[in-house]
């Protein structure tokens, strides 16, 4: 399965070779960059965060499929937690519901990515 990303776009925008980007993010070989640009595999958390630091672009924009997959997982878990705290009136449950509303409010619209 191919994984959509914009690594090549940002790398080329700054005239970086794959080897140079690998060096910037702490890899000895350009092969990791090449595989990711081809959509083969997923970046490690370390790689993704370092790319964000290099390009000044959020991980969600660099690797939208990775973001969407994890975002969807969080939303499923948030719905599950909502069912658990729904109807409770204690202060802790109220704070949990407030967080769940914030999570939903931060959900990007599909046309942003």
Image (tube, rainbow, N blue to C red):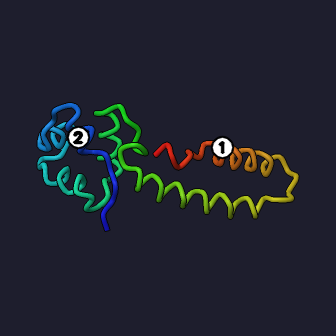
Q: Is residue 83 left or right of residue 74?
A: right
Snapshot quadrant of residue 83: bottom right
The residue to which callout 2 is attached is: 25
Q: Nearer the viewer, mark 1 or mark 2?
A: 1
Give the CA separation, mark 1 to mark 2.
32 Å
Position of 34 relative to 83 (above/below): above
Residue 1: where, in percent of width, then height?
31, 68
**Of the image marks 1 and 2, the number of the one nearer the N terminus:** 2
Label 2 Cα neighbours within 10 Å, binned few <14 / some 14-19 / many ≥20: some
Residue 93: where, in percent of width, then height?
79, 52
Residue depicted at x 17% and y 53%: 34
Give residue 105's mark: 1
Snapshot quadrant of residue 49: top left
Q: Is residue 81 left or right of residue 91?
A: left
Q: Is residue 35 left or right of residue 50?
A: left
Determine whether the residue tagged by mark 2 lies in a helix, strand or loop: loop
Give residue 90's mark: none
* Depth check, front residue: 20 or 107: 107
């Amino acid at each position: 399965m191919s994984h959509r990303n914009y690594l090549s776009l940002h790398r080329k925008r700054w005239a970086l070779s794959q080897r140079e980007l690998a060096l910037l993010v702490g890899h000895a070989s350009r092969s990791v960059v090449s595989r990711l640009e081809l959509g083969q595999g997923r970046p490690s958390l370390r790689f993704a965060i370092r790319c964000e630091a290099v390009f000044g672009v959020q991980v969600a924009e660099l690797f939208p499929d990775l973001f969407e997959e994890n975002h969807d997982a969080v939303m499923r878990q948030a719905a599950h937690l909502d069912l658990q705290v729904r109807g409770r009136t204690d202060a802790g449950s109220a704070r949990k519901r407030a967080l769940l509303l914030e999570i939903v409010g931060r959900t990007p619209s599909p046309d942003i990515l």
